[in-house]
Amino acid sequence: MRWLHSFLAGARAGAPDRGLAPQGVALLSAAALAMAPSATALVCGCGSREPQGAVQNGARTATQATSPHPSQVMPAFFPADALRLDGPGDVVLVEGKHGIRLTVGEYNARTEDERIMSGLDTLAARQSLLDRLIDFKVAAVEARLRGYTATAAANTFEEERELAQQILQRSIQDATSIGDEEARAFAQSHADRLPQATPEQLSDPGFLMHVKYIMQDQRLRERLTTWQAREEVTVRRDRFEALGRGAPPSAHAAAAADPKPESTKEPRP
């Protein structure tokens, strides 16, 4: 599960307007924190600016705030400036149907808004951000196809976020329709993911809700993979990695002019 931290703020803000009772919002938020990072982390900003970066083992990572109590420890995020690519803003990284398009300029602009948890090297953190932005765009297209509209968006970025939130919020709320017996069966058959599933916990409503969110997250990931295939999303990963390595400007220019995709996005497990 890759993206739930990003969904949390949007879920808190939007769920009451969509008929979710206050206790439902609390459950959603608790489950979100327990599951993070997850597929559903697509849409939430996770606070203001990240802590100062540090260099560890040759890769930039974020330092973590310290606190006398574990419950007060703030999550550490990868520094935004280390995620940016060095290249012309009009170089295309991602293309697909229904106007799906991501350029270096947009990717760099989104590094301040989309938080990547620390613990990754630079390449992996950039890839994680790229995949998240693709998920944003695919979910936004699905929302438009369903007839959803963005009501509070001031720009394209905010419109995508709001539309994606509507799709993902609905998916998270659908977790409440999963029965307890189905959740117990899932926990017992996925001991690698839920090693703590003791008989006592399998009778605990809070633990079962956690399991239901994990199940729904998995289903959402499957839907996103299907939507990506439908939209014929093409990701120029060779180009993306070359920009990350600081390829010379002539290579950037040639890449921007080349109309042929270098690679097609493979469904992620």
Image (spheres, grey):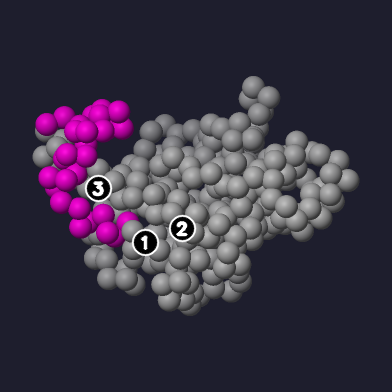
Tell me if 37 is positioned left or right of 110 in this view. left
Q: Quadrant of the C terminus?
A: top left
Q: CA distance from mark 2 to mark 1?
A: 17 Å
Q: Nearer the viewer, residue 224 or 37?
A: 224
Indicate the position of residue 158 as horizontal and vertical percent values.
55, 67
Q: Secondary structure at mark 2?
A: helix
Q: Nearer the viewer, residue 212 or 49?
A: 212
Q: If you read the primary sequence from the N terminus, does the residue marked by circle 1 or circle 3 appear first?
A: 1
Indicate the position of residue 267 as horizontal and vertical percent values.
49, 45
Tell me if 138 is positioned left or right of 171 in this view. right
Residue 118 visible somewhere in the drawing:
yes
Q: Amino acid at mark 2?
A: Trp
Tell me if 45 is positioned left or right of 15 in this view. right
Tell me if 122 is positioned left or right of 211 in this view. right
> Looking at the picture, does residue 136 appear above or below residue 264?
below
Residue 5 visible somewhere in the drawing:
no
Q: If you read the primary sequence from the N terminus, does the residue marked by circle 2 or circle 1 appear first?
A: 1
> Looking at the picture, does residue 74 appear above or below residue 165?
above
The residue drawn where x is 53% and y is 50% is 132
Q: Which residues are magenta?
A: 172-199
Q: If you read the primary sequence from the N terminus, does the residue marked by circle 3 or circle 2 appear first?
A: 3
Which residue is denoted by mark 1 in the rendering?
169
Foreground: disc 3 or disc 2:
2
Q: Secondary structure at mark 3?
A: helix
